Structures are given as structure tokens and as C-alpha cells.
Image (cartoon, grey):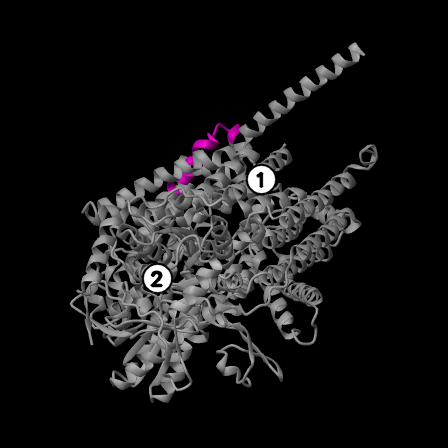
Amino acid sequence: MSKIKKLNKTTRSNFITYAIVIIAYILSQIFSSAGIMSNSLRGQLVPICAYVVMAISLNLTVGIMGELSLGHAGFMSVGAFTGVITAISLQDSVTSGPLRLLIAIVIGGIMAGIFSLIVAVPVLRLRGDYLAIVTLAFGEIIKNIVYCLYVGMDSNGLHIGTVSIEALQMEDGATTIINGPMGAVGITKLSTLLAGFLLILFSLFVVLNLIKSRSGRAIMALRDNRIAAESVGISPSKYKLMAFVTSAILAGMAGTLYAMNYSTVAAKKFDFNTSILVLVFVVLGGIGNIRGGIIAAVILTILPELLRQFSEYRMLTYAIVLILVMILTNGAKARQFLERIKGSLRFIKKKSDGGGAVNG
Amino acid sequence: MKKFFCIALALVMMLGCFAACGKATPADSANPADSAGKATGNPIKIGGIGPLTGGAAVYGNAAKHGAEIAVEEINALGGIQFELNFQDDEHDPEKSVNAYNNLKDWGMQILCGTVTTTPCIAVAPNSFSDRIFTLTPSASSPEVIKGKDNVFQMCFSDPNQGIASAQYIAENKLATKVAVIYNNGDAYSTGIYEKFSAEAATHGLDIVSVTTFTDDSQNDFSVQLADAKSAGAELIFLPIYYTPASLILNQAESMGFEPLFFGVDGMDGILTIEGFDTSLAEGVMLLTPFAADATDDATVSFVTKYNEKFSETPNQFAADGYDCIYALYEACTAAGITADMDTETICDKLIEAFATETDEDGNVTKEGLVFEGLTGAGSSMKWAKTGEVFKAPMAVVIKDGVYVGM
Amino acid sequence: MTVLSNLINGISLGSIYAIIALGYTMVYGIAKMLNFAHGDVIMVGGYMAFCAMTYLGWGVLPGILLAVIICTVLGVVVEKLAYKPLRSAPSLAVLITAIGVSYFLQNTALLIWGSDPKVFSSVVSLPSLKLFDGQLSISGVTQVTVISCVIIMTALVLFTSKTKIGKAMRAVSEDKGAAQLMGINVNSTISVTFAIGSGLAALAGVLLCSAYPTLMPTTGSMPGIKAFTAAVFGGIGSIPGAMVGGILLGIIEIFGKAYISTQLSDAIVFAVLIVVLLVKPTGLLGKPINEKV
């Protein structure tokens, strides 16, 4: 314990973050294998992992880079569909499930990274709400394109078209991979909690190290005062691009993980609402606070399921909880109140410490 | 402090989760139907899944309400007792799987769902591997039942509707120049369109204009209608739901364009939209298994009850939900299923009870369930071993605000 | 001739976006927050007018008036309860709260009015205008929407530049702290902004539902997002910009559908938007951002 205290503040905080993730994983493994975890929670473990990675990744854009993104689900979508295509087309050549998942996740991430380079052009020029609208537009464009995307596979390889599966003119016995608005169907589930856990650790490792590095400090300097940062020779293009692409790659990976957990995935899932959902995780957890984002992602994914007992009032309750939590954690009055409690706690603690000293 | 708050909340949630699961496992006999004293033991637990909130809420709520009425009626009969637990999935595959797992925790023995197609494709593999018998009221894609022996459909499959529509239009020589407007963001609509266009070609129908819209742009149809008009279409085929269809009819009228309109089962409900000017729908033809103003006793009694209870007129989804519960009831009675059987036994017995088997020549080798419901258009329904339903589509035309058989 | 008629259809769709965008941009310009619940206030306005006219049998004008009053009150109440406590919080926290409010309004509407769509009978009884021997027709709703759009825009511009409250609003939008020091009551100014914005939303709701007469709890959300896009397109915060942005967005959408592809119409709209923003990074009529060192 004393060793941990000696470490510097960020390292200690990062250590705690890793510890929380690892402990949560071990606990859920124990509960799951002991059979005392409800089916409902067990079914949510992989999506929770995907959302946690999304929260970490968006925190890099919103918290560290300081730009609002309303289309993060677009990258998730790119990753998801690329990952599914990869996994299905490798079905025969790579027989090991985990290896196939790994390849799919990597390729999904890379593809999302490539798309983010395209979006990065406006990202480097625009700021604030104008950037937000570009990311929103990107998410919508991806959704609309996937609606018209038909991908199938036969012995000649992949076929890609925009009209219909029949129009691909594949041989008999071909596999349909993406069927327009129906999305990808017939996915073999490969995602596991372990894969999700490793992906979370990987993204934590990437993001936390990026923040700590020289580049990370440059990115944050740009966020806090762009002109001052530029005046000391920090190139906004380079560092913003670095943060944005990293964030998109992680989102793409999360997308693959998410898609490979269900037997179907449709483009509609990755719409504006999902982007907003991830944004809510980030803001609720404290903008720029990676650990807070992770916790918020977990809570807000489980919360609607816990509210099922409210039946038709479920989503209403969810909305009210969301508003109340925002006001309680960010409201001026609520903050004063909490500060006061904190103050009096400190006072009591001091008093008892002081008393102890006298007695000792 | 915020962190503290978050962690505290997290702990509470975690506890809540585990506490909830602890409670769920023992078979709770909280509300066995007390409606009739002669109830035979515990009710059979039927789970339902559909969108009760969000943009597709209208379909889920209708199916839920229909199923509720059926359960009430069946429980009042005093024979087999049902308990229905209907969960929301917001038309999202992820939420749908969550709802499914939630129902499993509750102790679901039979699944009546899910209402919409995409979520159903996500849920069906789970119910297949868990061996929970599944009867979906309205998930119409063939993908839903593909390769799953225990998943059955109550509605027509999309390809069948597309083919039947093309055949009907061609055989009755309704038109030769056809325009199509469909929702290219919707699996149901696209599925019907694809089969329709393939079948239309073989019947000499000339598709002169194909235009689309998505859920995000289903307000303005001026371009689509103008395209159909300038291509000289005599008939517009609308494989879409009734809400956008009502807008299309409205806008076609205001631009003075009067082709024939031909819809599919999703169009049913158009006459009962509150405030809709039914004269706009005059002459619209549709293939539908259910008509709310049919005069047979079963439909009349259902529509009256539905109206009393929910002050709405039931649409096809409500009738599908109602029929699902009754089909399950008849199959359960025939197979002698009781609530204390495990889900796997129930599943096997229900598959046995539902499926009609045929040999290669089409001769029936084993009779399955023959079901007379609201959505059979007067004839009886049968199920193939694959899970697909056989029933006659009924073509109706709207005259003076009511359906008239053709 | 088809080009002209598409143009008219575009203006007709665009004027609906414009009228929603006016309310959006008003709130954004003064309160500096993206009010994602704006689209849902529109939906409430539509339902209110629908109830007044269908269930209570009221006439068109009293119905609209009721919708405007209720939405104005709703806007002020929501502002007081949900946004005011967050005045000093980061803008993203307010954004999320607005999304919470949006979910709240949608789900309340779902509980009250059910999920079945309602058909709104148009409040406009004006005949459509026929031009070129009837080859071109402009519907009554379009005429009314375009005219009211122009009137509202002019009124808003005059209001913010000529009246005392309007000037106070501009002061608050420039610098809250300094405005307060000059004796402007920031809280009441923002309340008035929300009142006006929500009242406009009610009007927009009535016109939206008159043009596209289906009413569901989710009716407002997609037009809300499109209008937000329009407001940014025109330069968010700029009142004439919102109108120009809205109408252009409508025209692009219709032309994209008519001449490129109906399947990709939304993708085309957003792609054009991205290109425009690349050329003009602060929207069409937006003020360039001044940076202070």
C-alpha cells in the first residue's frame, strides 16, 4: 500500500483504473462460473465491454482533444461490418475462433482508422459545433451507405454490390454476408468476455500511455489554448490527427467486438442515438476522466435492464435518472452541497486525528 | 466527489443485479390466475418481446395488447393457464437479446416474439440453442426461421408476399406499368421489393420507376411520386407500413396523381389511424391476412374488446399477437403440456404439435396443428416443419372506408 | 418545368426545416446550448394543437394559441428545472441534460397519447396556387410556411436589434458576466429566450404536422436533427442563416433525390454539408470566430 502511495499521482490513478477493470473481470468470471449471475447480466457482459472501449475511445476525442463528436458510432459501424466480413471470409482458412476474432478486430480497427483519415480533413479545419455536425453527418452517411451495401461470398471470393444479393450473381451455395438494410446475418458468435476484457486493457494501455506521453501533453495543450500551444511550436494538425485516428481505431475495434457477439448486426444500430449514448457515458463519467467514463458506461448499460420492473415507465425513469444525475454531479448548488459535506467530513477527520494525537 | 458518487452508484447497481437474480430463480407463483377457481396448477410462462417505446412502438404495443386479450380469455376458460410477461426491446437487437435473457431469468417457458424482424434474427439463435419454443407474431424474414427447428412464424414471409403481390397484379391485369416506392432502410420492405421485382419480370409486368425512402426521410414523397407519374405508372406498389403510406396517399392526392395503389400486410391499419381521411384510401388494394372490420364473430368480439380496453382499433400486429397466444393454447392442449414440464420437453412437444410434415411428393405424412385464427382470412393455417406458415393471403380493396374482398 | 417543380418542393420542405431551425438558433445564440429537446417540444406542440382541434373541437386559431402557450410554459419550466442548475457547468453537461429532457418528453407523450400515429388535419385551408396552366402548383401549407418563416425571421431580427430585451439577449450572448455587471438579469433573459424558442417550436410543430400530417411521439426527433444541421449550415446563432440554411437543405435534399439517388438522399445532404463547411468553416452566414490570445 505504501508503495502505491509513493507513486506519482497519475501513475497511481492509472494503476487504480487497471485494478478496477481487472477486479471487475475476475469478479464477473467468478460469479458467472458459480452460476449466481443472472442471465440478463451475463448476456450484457460483452456489449458492456464494447461500450467501455467506446467510452475510452470517445474520451480521447472529447476529453483529451476537447472536440465534440456526434458520430462516433459511425466508426463503430465501419469496424463492425469490416470485422464481420473478415471473420466470415476467413471461416475456412482460419479455424481457430479466437485467432479469427483477433484478425477481425485488428482489420476492423484499421478500416475505421482509414475512414477517420477521410473525416480528419474537416476535423483539422473546423471547431466546436461545426465539427460536431460534420461527425454527425459522417455517422449518417455511413448508415445510409450500409443500407445499400450487399456483400456475399462464394468460391470466387467476395462480391460487393449496391442493388441486391441476386444482382451479385454468385454461384449456388454462396454465403450472404451483408444484406442491405438487414445488415449482416448469420454471424458466428466469437466474442467472449475474455476478448472484451483484453480489448479494454489494450485500449486503456493505449490511451493512458498516450495521455502521459509527450504527444498527449501536446494534445492537451492544444485543447487548453491552441494559440499558445501553436506559438511554442506544437503542430495542431499532427497531434489532432493522432488523437482522432487513435480514437477511431479503438471505436472500430469495439464495433467488431460488439458485432461478433450477436448473430446479426444492422446499420441502424449505429445511428445518432448510439453516438449520443456513448457521449453520455463520457460526460457522466467526467469529461477527460477515463475511469469515470468506464464506470458510467457500465452503469448506464445495466440501468435500463434494471428498470424493467417499471414496465411502461422504464424509459421515462431512465430519462429522469439521467437528468437528475447530470444536475447532481454538475449543478452549482449540488456541487456546493457536496463540497460542504466534504468539508465537514474533513473537519471531523482532522478533529479525530488531532484528538488522537493528544491522547497518544 | 463525482468519482465517489459514481463508484457508490456502481456498487448499488451491482448489488441490485445480484439481488435481482437471486430472487428470480425460485419459481414464483405470485399470480396464478385467480379468475377461475378450477385453474389447473401453475400457469405456463410465456415471454413476449417487442418494441414498446421508440419509433417502432406502434407494432410492439399492438402485438402486446392483442396477446394480453388472448391470455385473459384463455385464463377465463379455466383450462391451461398462461402468464404473459412482455418486455420492451426498442426495436434494437441488443436490447432484444437483453429482454430475452431477462425473460429467461423470469422462467419463461415459451417465447412469443419478437415482433420486429431484425431483433428477431438476433434472438432466434438464442432461443434455438436454449431450446425454448418460439412463435413470432410478425417477424417476417426467412432469415428468422432459417435452420431453426423450434422457431415458427405467424405471419407471411416477405418473399411470399412479394411473389403473391406480383402474381395477383399480373393475373388480374391490374396494370402493366408499375412503380414501386419502398423503404430501403427496412429489412421487411426491401425483402418484399426484391422478390416482387424478380417475380414481376416473369409475369410481364414493367417496373417503370423504383424509388426509396428511409425512416429518416419519410416525410416528403414529392420526388418519388413525380418520378412515378412522369414514368407513366398505372399502379404504385407500396411494400411499406401504413404510416408512410398514409403520407404518400395524401401527397399523391394533393399533386393530382391518381394511380392504383397496391399494398401488403403492413398497409393494414391505414383506415384506423386517428384522424385519417379514409376517402384518400379509396380504391387502395392490399394483401392482408386480417381486416378489423370483418364481420365474423371472432373478429368482431376481438375488435370490440380491444377497443374497450385500449380505445384503439386493432391492426394486423394486434391480431397476430392474439393469434399467437391462441395457436400456442391449442398446441399446448393438443400436446398435453403442463406448467411443470421443463422448457426442452415443452419445446419438443410443441414442435411435434405445430409442424405438418410432408414427403417429397407433397403428401402429408403427419398432420400438425390446424389453426383457425383472425389472421387466416377465413381459411385455416398450417405450419411447415421449417417454421413457415401456410395461409391464404386475402386481397381486399378499400371502398367507402371499409375493406371489401376481391 | 420539372426542375422548377422540384425547386418548389425543395423550398416547401426547406421552409419547414427553416422554421424549426429558427427556434434552434435563437436558443443557441443566446443561451449557448444545443437544445436537443427542441424537436420534442415541436412534437408536444403538434399534439396540443391536435387535441384542441380534434378532442375539444376548437377552431384553428385557438388551437394554435393553446399549443403556443403550453409550449412556452413547457420551455420555461424545463429551463428552470433542468438547465438553470447547470448554468456554470460545462456545455456538454447541458447537452446531455437536453437529451435527457428529449427522452423524457418522448416517453411522456408515448404514455399519454399512445404509440399509434394520429393524422393531423391541416390548419391551412388556403387553396394551392397554380402556375403555368396548372403545371406547377404551390400548396397552401407551403405558402403559409414560407410567409410565416419570413415574418418570424424579420420579427426576430428586429426584436433582437431594436427592443430592450432583445438587446439584453445579445449582451448575454456576448458575455454573461459583463451583461450581469451592466444590470441585466441574465436568468430572466435566458428564460425569455426559451419562452420565445419554445413558442416558435409550437408554431413549427403545427406547420410540420400540416405539411406531413402524421403525429407520433417520435415525430419531432428527425426533423429536429435536420433542423440542427440546417442551423449549423447557415451559421449557428445567425437568425437569417437559419432560414437560408433550412431552405437550402430542403432544396439539396429534393434535388439529391430527384437527380442522383433516392436511396442515398440523406448521405448526399450530409456530404454537401461537409463540403460547404470545408469551404466556409463557420457556415454560410456565420460570424468568423475571433480568437483572443
Q: Position of residue A353 (x, y in %)?
A: 75, 17
Q: Cβ–Cβ below 8 Å for labels 1 and 2?
A: no
| As drawn, B263 above or below A317 | below
| Residue B213 appears anywhere in the view | no
Residue kind at label 1, given as amino acid type: Pro
Q: Residue furthest top?
A: A359
Task: Please state, as top left, top right, bottom left or bottom right, where the N terminus of chain C lies in the image.
Answer: bottom left
Q: Which mark is residue B48?
A: none
* Label 1 crowd (10 A; few <14 / some 14-19 / many >=20): few
SS assignment for the magenta stretch, majority? helix
- Mark 1 chain: C
Residue A262, given in percent of the width and then of the height, sits at 56, 62
**Residue topped by disc 1:** C90
- Name the image quarter holding residue B360: bottom left
Q: Quadrant of residue A113?
A: bottom right
Q: Position of residue A338 (x, y in %)?
A: 59, 27
Residue holding disc 2? B324
> Left or right: where does residue A58 sit relative to residue C26?
right
Q: Is residue C190 magenta?
A: yes
Residue A90, image x, y percentages: 66, 74
Identify the magenta region: C180-197
Considering the numbered disc 2 on the image, is that residue within a helix, a strand or a loop?
helix
Is B109 in the magenta?
A: no
C83 or B51: which is nearer to us?
B51
Element carrying mark 1: loop
